[in-house]
Image (cartoon, rainbow, N blue to C red):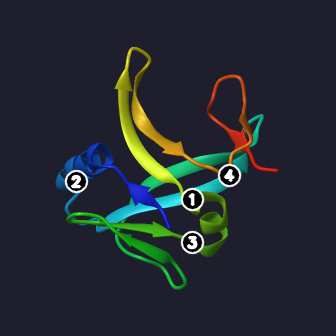
Amino acid sequence: MISVTEKAQERVRSLLKEKPEMGGLRVRVIGGGCGGLEYKLDLDKGPQEGDKIVEGEGFQVYVDNKSYLFVINSVLDWKEDLMGSSFRFENPQVKGTCGCGSSFYIE
């Protein structure tokens, strides 16, 4: 399953306060970028049929079955550094990333 760090949970809760009609965070893996795959994160009202659901503190994370295959055993974190702030995945399945780091590939 996916783990969500405390910093990432704090950020999700902050985003959900701005949009109280949303119930959680949707995690998807889509085709794109020079590495072939990209993470896509959005707020969502609730789970869809077949979603895997991860319980956060005060919210849920929804992952469709196809995306779940690419993020299993990953850790979602919120990082702030000189390059900016963003959600980042520590994914043991990733074998490499593109030069700009926005896409990845799995062998």
- In this view, 106 is above or below 33: below
Separation of residues labelled 2 and 1 (CA atoms): 19 Å
Q: Amino acid at mark 2?
A: Arg
Q: Are marks 4 and 1 in contact (CB under 8 Å)?
A: no
Residue drawn at x 28%, y 52% is 9
Other residues around mark 2 within 10 Å, as few (<14) / some (14–19) / many (≥20): many
Q: Nearer the viewer, mark 4 or mark 3?
A: 4
Marker disc for residue 64 = 3
Cα separation, mark 4 vs mark 2, equals 27 Å
Q: Secondary structure at mark 4?
A: loop
Q: CA distance from mark 4 to mark 1?
A: 15 Å
Report which residue position mark 2 lands on.
13
Three-letter code for the amino acid on which mark 4 is drawn: Gln
Task: Name the residue at 48% across, 40% down.
Answer: 88
- Label annotation for residue 28: 1
At label 3, the amino acid type is: Asp
Callout 1 secondary element:
strand
Please give the label number shown on residue 93.
4
* Residue 29 rendering spot, x and y as whole percentages: 62, 56
